[in-house]
Structure formats: C-alpha cells, structure tokens
Image: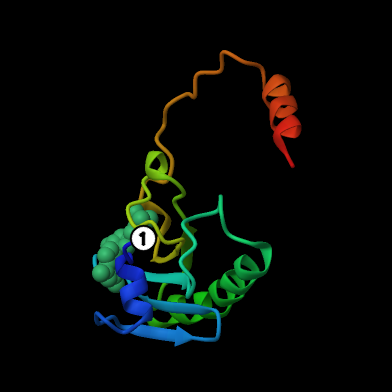
Amino acid sequence: MEDTVFMKIVKREIPADIVYEDAQTLAFLDIKPIALGHTLVIPKKPFENIFDIDDETLSAIMRTVRKISPAVRDAVGAHGVHINSNHGEAAGQVVHHLHFHIIPRHARNEFEFWPETDCPTPTSASEIAEKIREKIV
Ligand code: 5GP
C-alpha cells in the first residue's frame, strides 16, 4: 500500500512543523489551519482510523492529545480547543491515516458548531440504543 502524506512526514520524506514526538506518536501543524495553531496528532504506525486501531496505540495518541492541548491553546492565547477526528470518507476523512485535530478557539461566537437543523428520527432512541448495544463486540 502506498504511504499517505502522514507516513511521509513520519519518515521525514516531506517537511512538517513538528511540535512533539514520542515513541508512538507525532504532532505537527496542519498545512491548512482552520485557526492559528491547528495541530494534528497521529500514530507513527499507519492505522487508518478508529475501526482498525488497537487500544494501546489509541491510548498513546490520547496521552499526546492531552499533553499538547494546553500548549496549543496557550501558544495562541486561545480559550479552548476543539478536539476533532474524522473516521471514514463519509465523515470527511481525507487522509487515510488516523489523526486528531486540535483546533484553538478564542470565543464562542466565532464558529457554528452544529447546524441548527432537526435530526430526522424515524426510529425511536430506545430502538437505536438497543441496536448499538447488539453491535458492541
Ligand atoms: P481530515 O479531513 O482527513 O480529517 O483532515 C486531514 C487534514 O490533514 C486536513 O486538515 C489537511 O489540511 C491536513 N493535511 C493534508 N495534507 C497535509 C500535509 O501534507 N501536511 C500537513 N501538515 N497537513 C496536511
């Protein structure tokens, strides 16, 4: 399988503004930031997304997300961060190497987080909850 751009960054084949690295994870600035300081955290191994990653590597990624989030926030004088992650093309995942976005936010009114539309609910919440419980392995 051909390397994604993120594996090329891990291997230092293409440049990136790396802000943190440990044995299992790497954090670097997003090339097209939504906000100044927008940072990505990835595993060094090429897991695609939440559907194939193992618990231990995911824990390492979340440790890094927790470690650098305050630094990202404070480096740009922000008040909070979004921690966002897209899994699968249907959810907007473009780079097929698992990553978490850390996006600084300065004020509540600078973004519209959820669209103000009602989610159609042909199935009752209790039925959906039951289906999810059945699918958990
Ligand atoms: P996704 O939509 O897959 O969650 O987001 C992928 C992110 O990777 C985007 O925000 C995009 O700007 C970023 N990105 C794509 N290619 C590169 C690259 O070569 N270098 C860096 N630093 N970020 C990239």
In the rendered structure, the answer to whether residue 63 lies left or right of residue 131 reads: left
Ligand 1 closer than 8 Å to the CB at disc 1?
no
Q: Is residue 134 above or below residue 106?
A: above
* Residue found at x 75% / y 30%: 134
Q: Check disc 1 and give the amino acid type.
A: Met
In the rendered structure, the answer to whether residue 70 lies left or right of residue 72 reads: right
The one nearer the camera, 45 or 58, is 45
In the rendered structure, the answer to whether residue 72 lies left or right of residue 36 reads: right
Quarter of the figure with residue 123: top right
Residue found at the far top of this picture? 122
Residue found at the far front of this picture? 1
Q: Quarter holding the N terminus?
A: bottom left
* Residue found at x 45% / y 75%: 73
Quarter of the figure with residue 136: top right
The one nearer the camera, 127 or 108, is 127
Where residue 34 sits: x, y (%)? 29, 61
Instruction: Say what secondary structure mark 1 lies in.
Output: loop
Residue designated by label 1:
1
* Residue found at x 49% / y 71%: 45
Q: Is residue 107 above or below residue 40?
A: above
Where residue 137 sits: x, y (%)? 74, 42
* Residue found at x 71% / y 28%: 129
Mark 1 nearby-residue class (10 Å; few <14, some 14–19, many ≥20): few
Q: Quadrant of ligand 1?
A: bottom left
The one nearer the camera, 89 or 110, is 89
Color theme of the render: rainbow
Residue 82 visible (yes or no): yes
Q: In this view, does 94 lie above or below 36?
A: above
Where residue 68 sits: x, y (%)? 51, 79
